[in-house]
Image: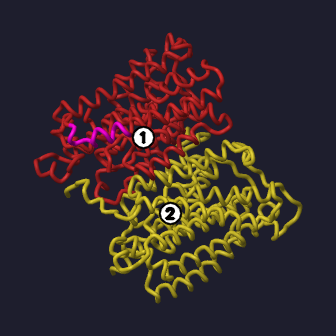
Amino acid sequence: MATSLQNAPETTGSAARRPTLSERQKVAIVTVSVLAVVTAVAALRAGSSTVLVQALVTGVLTGGIYSLVAMGLTLIYGVLHIINFANGALVALAMYLTFVTVDTMGVHPYTALLVVVPAMGVLGALLQTSLLNPVMRAPIQIQLLVTIGLALAIENVLLLVFGPTPRSVQLPGNVGVSILGATVELSRIYAFVGALVLVAILSLVLQRTAIGTSIRAVAANPEGARLVGINTKSIYSVTFALGAMAAGAAGVLVAPFTTIEPTSGAIFNLTAFVVVVLGGMGNIPGALVGGLVVGLTEQLAGLILPDESPLLAVFVVFLIVLFIRPKGVFGRAS
Amino acid sequence: MTTTATPRTSTSAGGGLTGRLTTDTGSQRSRGDYVVLAVFVAVAAAVPFVLSASDMAIANRVLIFAIMGVGWNIMAGFGGMFSFGHAAYFGIGAYATAYGVVVLGLSPWLGMLLGIAISVAAGVGISYLALRYKLTGAYYTMSTFAFAEALRLFVIGNDALNRTVGFTIPVQQGSSLVDFQFPAGSPWYYWIGLGLLGMCLLASILFVRSRPGRFTIAARDDDVAAAALGIDVLRHKLFAVAVSAAITAVAGTYYVQYYMFVDPEIAFGAAASNDAIITAVVGGTGTIWGPIVGAIIMAPLSDVVTGFLRTPPPGFEWLAGHGGLDIILYAVILVAVVILLPKGVYGTLVSRRRKS
């Protein structure tokens, strides 16, 4: 898979463009062995295989959800080089849109995708065109401040309109099922599958469509893309729209098992940053792997250090990775 | 207008927001700064005689915002290290003070020194790593953000720091300068805060005039050229970080002593980082006085909005009892200033005046 946005458009899988295979293998081996050791320690601490299996299954599923939320973030970073601090707020907005759709029309929550995803796409394009395109030449922190302002505005408009009362969306037939002895809600499995589908869709859009080729061209070399007649500004808008749509899809899929509050997305924001850095910023399949690593780290750390916040381990891993391999563990080597 | 994504030239960590535009480095201007500082403190000291007791709460918040903005500005405005995690230093100052007072039985002033010491050590440590490994742009941003977040999670998981409950400073009878406690509504809180702000501003002016300060600004504008001239970029940037972390920790101490309460969200939450950034950005980064202007604009917003909603004009009644409007305004001002006045309100005024 060569869906990393850093790759040139014509690359569709040649090994020469990627870090050497041995390096990838090394990273994979180190990651797997570290996870194995951590799992073993967690198993000793937990003392029961049921608890361990529950943690592993939950970790993988939660990881899928983290990567789902991170997908829009990594796409936007890959092309616009903006860390979209508003990603979480967009996810929260999508959750509320799902709530409203289900509440007023009485439809199945997943049919809300048909309403929410296009709506988020339009919103994303508008935001990029009106607020971010004017500052695309400014230093990076200007753009970050715009997205921070956006995040605050979206969250507080939600607070203003819906109030602080938490909302929820019921998924019909959302029962717990048993996987390898671990009990999991069906809605989480659907969200996990949704993450896989989203990776596939985004990869297809980027690899197989004309607009995807243009997006990759702009990501690889905006100046060159402009010279061959690509309107970079509209590509930026399309990319932000795609990122917002990914956030929208994520919002719909997580709504059935998330307490819907204005700040619900901000909680995902933090893990999404970690996922994106681990996976290599701009690398869409990388986000999937990063999500799984974060989900497992969180669950296993919860077993090893039950008194600490499980996310603390995630952030420590994050800071270490940031300093040692800032291009991402699973991204291209610098 | 052509737009490309290439001209992202920030080579230093984060890059200076205003580039080389509005730094008051000329010595004659800096002498003027001392005069302005003296006049500012003298005039501001009279505020308690003018404002009502309820308005003094707003004035105190202006002071907290201003100290945070001044602290952040040293690192980001003058140092070019655009931190999104100044909540770390604010929170360390707040928690060190609260822990010192509640658990160790120290005077808050000793708690303040403790907070400054830990904050400086933490700031220099994390920034050494970030600069040593040359984190730039988005990665630098993430490291600062993650550091504050990791501290928040650490406190939430730490029994000695009361987890999510936080600390409440025990109330004492009467006034005591040593214990930094006065009856509610006493102007002494304001005067002490003003004194602290004055010292932080003085530190800011001295920093900009000092050799480390000038070297830091040079490195902000072009760290390769600065290094080529023999400037020890890393050491001077770390000095800027230390000053910035110390000032921000002072804001944390003042917060705890004034509100007499702190919890992990207040201390280390993203809102604290945002307050520091937005105060300086709205006023003008890389200027001595920008954060003061920013604090005067931004800090009273929520009270103004609350007052507005208490007696909403016709057509706005539905807003009564809903929260969020203040932060929406806050966000709108931030985005508008960033897009329309990237030098900030004060920065723009200064550069206009210089042109004419």
Q: Is residue A267 left or right of residue B97?
A: left
Location of residue B256 (image quadrant): bottom right
Q: Amino acid at mark 2?
A: Tyr
Q: Amino acid at mark 1?
A: Asn
Q: Is residue B124 visible?
A: yes
Relative image position of residue B62 (x, y in whole percent): 61, 64
Q: How dense is the environment of label 2, judged by Cα within 10 Å: few (below 14), some, or many (20 and up)?
A: some
At mark 2, the secondary structure is helix
Q: Which residues are magenta?
A: A15-26
Residues behind callouts 2 and 1 on a single chain: no
Q: Is residue A18 magenta?
A: yes
Say which colour chain A has.
red
Q: How dense is the environment of label 1, judged by Cα within 10 Å: few (below 14), some, or many (20 and up)?
A: many
Q: Chain of mark 1?
A: A
Location of residue A67 (image quadrant): top left
At mark 1, the secondary structure is helix
- Residue B128's disc is 2
Q: Is residue A219 magenta?
A: no
Closer to us: A323 or A133: A323
| Colour-to-chain, yellow | B
**Residue B251 sits above or below residue A332 on the image:** below
Q: Chain of mark 2?
A: B
Q: Residue at x 72, y 71 (%)?
A: B192
Q: Is residue A150 left or right of residue B279?
A: left
- Residue A87's disc is 1
* Count of picture labels: 2
